Amino acid sequence: MKKVLSPVTSLLAGFFVLSLVAMQPQAATAGNMKTYQKDAGEVASRHEHREFKAHLHKRRGFKTHSQILNRPLDTVNFSDGTSYDTTLHFTTGIGSGAFHYPGDDRNTVYTISDRGANIKCDDDVDIIGADICADGKIFPIANYSPSIFKLQRHGRHGWKITDVIRIKDGSGKQLSGLPNPLTTMTTENAYDKQGNPIDFDANGLDTEALLRLSDGTFWVSEEYAPSLVHVSAAGEVLERLVPVGIANELAGANYPVVGVLPAILSKRKLNRGIEAIAVSPDERYIYFIMQSPLANPDKKAYKKSRNVRLFKMDRQNEEIIGEYAYVIDTPETFLADSTSKQSKVKVSEMVAYGNDKLIVLERINHTTKLYRINLDGATNILNSAWDDTVTSPSLEQVTDLASVAITPIDKEIALDSAVDLPPDALPSKVEGVAILDKHELFLINDNDFGIKGAVTRLVDLKVGRRFFK
């Protein structure tokens, strides 16, 4: 069967509209082959595609200005020469995380990609038209290197990528986003576009969030180990901090790997690792949070739990000094989504606006919530029985934290996109938030490298004076 996805151009109106050409793929079928195609001109030109629109929601005091920024990556053909022939045009996913360094002007942000384009083996028939692997992920661009992007805003022309920093090992070789050879915790198999197995890579990173320090270096969170990675201004990995007991499994990495993080993190659910990282204004502390509850003691606990672990690290000594329980919302409160599965609720970003004061992003797909949180008053459970895998019930199995003398992190809603904004003001799957100043946030989505036609949207969100109260 042949599928052709063609662009549909629609005109939308908004407050202070600069210009807008919205492309959405449509499907048509014919013949025995299948092709996925986006704007051929975009791919051929290799130029970034940018579009703008704006919204004003007076009742809530929020104003959004939205821009599409597509960066063509590669075109990959999947074919056995007879039964299937599928072409995918990939765009670079630049929105897994975002950060604004306070020393920069408000028109500069950094964002980060994840590990690169990947397709679940369970989805291979739907996406490429053939069953080429049984368990794991297809990496159609296996040499993709996780990257940091510098974006700058130029007046009415909007945001533009001005620099790309490829993450590299100790020899200067660009790293891959391929899975690690882990045995203590779950990992996944990797395959090329023909379904041939790809070897594990101890150097590989699945990057998810970033921050930049005054010395120009970056700290990056990633999901595989899970780990925190210190990266030079030029992109070289200086050090990778992993859970205690994991370092030996990454002995083949061409950079230092140190077991510093709590061993309990080896219970992370696959693809639900350290999703967000933040730094205190004085740069003394780094905060990081898991995307979801741990699979502790098993996947059943992960699926039902609402208790996510947030950590605080003394940056200078690289010592974990705090661990707290953050309780995510129930799925029915995400009004633009329709699911009853607790595991669909994820933490996708975190940014600090004071010492122990942070903004946390919770989402499903179409609903984005931003919460103000304060660690003051929350119970520090670091090095307690809750970090022991033999503790039963585990933290993830406890439904009433007060009954076990744990005070969770206090949180207060700052924005609920389903309530406070028009339906299309934010994109689906927002994963990056940066504070530009006390009146404006920068938000960006993860487009999954355009596998299913999603675009990257950047949103400037004007907030009221009480947003950071």
Image (tube, rainbow, N blue to C red):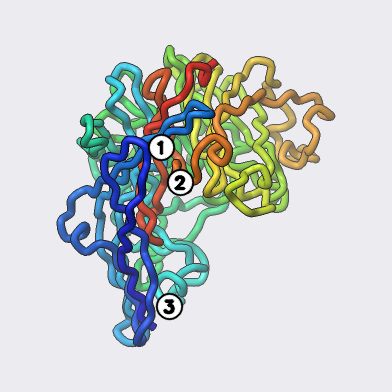
As drawn, the residue found furthest toward the left would be 45
As drawn, the residue found furthest toward the top would be 282
Residue assigned mark 1:
55
Q: Quadrant of the C terminus?
A: top right
Q: Is residue 263 above or below residue 4?
A: above
Q: Alpha-carbon distance for marks 3 and 1?
A: 42 Å
Residue 307 in percent (x, y) is at 68, 37
Is tag 3's residue or tag 1's residue first in the polypeptide sequence?
A: 1
Residue 229 visible to the viewer:
no
| Amino acid type shown at disc 3 | Ala
Q: Alpha-carbon distance for marks 3 and 2?
A: 34 Å
| Amino acid type shown at disc 1 | His
Q: Nearer the viewer, mark 2 or mark 1?
A: 1
Tell me, yes or no, whether the two marked residues, 3 and 1, touch with CB atoms within 8 Å. Answer: no
Q: Quadrant of the N terminus?
A: bottom left
Q: Is residue 371 left or right of residue 258?
A: right
Residue 184 in percent (x, y) is at 58, 48
Helix, strand or loop under label 3 = loop
Closest to the observer, 325 or 41: 41
Helix, strand or loop under label 2 = loop
Q: Which of the numbered marks, if any, corresponds to residue 424?
A: 2
Closest to the observer, 335 or 119: 335
Residue at x 38%, y 29% (from the top left corner): 99
Residue assigned mark 3:
130
